[in-house]
Image (spheres, rainbow, N blue to C red):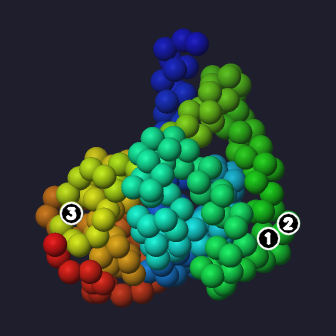
Amino acid sequence: MTWTQVLATLVLAAFVTQAAISVTTVYLHRGLAHRAITVTSPVAIVCRSIIWVTTGMKPREWAAVHRKHHAATDTADDPHSPIVHGFWRVQLANAALYRRAARNELTQHKYGKDLTADWLDKVLFDRAFLGLGVGVTAAIGVSMLLGFGPWVGLAAATLHMVSYLMLSGAINAVGHLYGTRPYATSATNLPWVALLTGGVGLHNTHPAAPTSARFSLHKGEFDPGWLIIRTLAFFRLATIRHHEVKFKRAAA
C-alpha cells in the first residue's frame, strides 16, 4: 500500500466506525434501550440499516442486553462486568459476552418484551451475515470509486470491525474501573473515551440519570451524541423525552 492508500484506509475506517458508534449511542442506547428519545420512522430505518451493514447486530437484542446490564450492574448477572469477568475478557471478548446474553431467551423475554421483530427484521435486519456482506461490499465499492482499489476498502472494513469492538469493550471494561465517579454508580467518567464513543464514556453520569438524552452534565464534558440528538430534534426528526435531567442516583 502507498501512504495515500494507508491514509484513505484510516479515514474510511474512522468514518464507518463513528457512524456505527453514533447510531449505537443515539438510536440503540438512548432511543430503544432507555426511551430517552423517539425518532421518526424514516430515521429509525436509516439507523437500523447502518447498524445492519456495520455491525450485523439486532437492535432489539442489543437493547435487551443493555437493560439487563443496568438491572444487574457489576453483579454475577451482569452480561459484561469487568468486576465479574475480568478486565481483559471484557475488553477483548465483549462481543462474545454480548452474544451469550443475547442468545439467552430469558434476556429478551424479561428485558425486551416491548421490542418485537417486524417484517423488515424478518426479511433483512435479522440476517447478520447478509448485512455485513453488504457493508464490506459497499466499502470496497466506495474505495474503487475513489480510485484506491478494492484492498483499501477491505482493509478499512477490517479496521472498522476491530475499532468498533475495541471501543465497545473499552466502554464496559475501562468505563467501570478507571476515571471519575461524581455520582454513586460503579461506572466512571472518562472524557477521552466519551469523545471516541459518542458520549458514552460519560459512563458514571448515565446510570445516575438513565432516561436523560444528554450525558454531559458538568463543565468541560462533551457529548457528541447529544449534538446529533439536538440536530434531529431541531428538524423534528426526533422527540426528546424530557429536557430536565431526572436523577435516579445522587451525587457521590
Residue 200 at what x, y percent from top left? 38, 60
Q: Residue at the location (70% across, 67% down)?
A: 104
Q: Residue furthest right?
A: 123
Where is the N terminus found, in terms of image quarters? top right
Q: Is residue 162 above or below residue 71?
A: above
Determine contact: label 2, label 3, CB under 8 Å.
no
Give the structural element (helix, strand or loop) at label 2. Answer: helix
Can residue 135 be seen here? The reply is yes
Q: CA distance from mark 2 to mark 1?
A: 5 Å
Give the structural element (helix, strand or loop) at label 1. Answer: helix
Residue 96 at what x, y percent from top left? 62, 49
Q: Residue at the location (78% across, 77% down)?
A: 118
Type of residue at label 1? Leu
Q: Is residue 75 left or right of residue 97?
A: left
Q: Residue furthest top?
A: 2
Nearest to N terminus: mark 2 or mark 3: 2
| Of the pair 112 and 147, the residue shown nearer to us | 112
Q: Which mark is residue 181?
A: 3
Q: Which mark is residue 123?
A: 2
Determine contact: label 2, label 1, CB under 8 Å.
yes
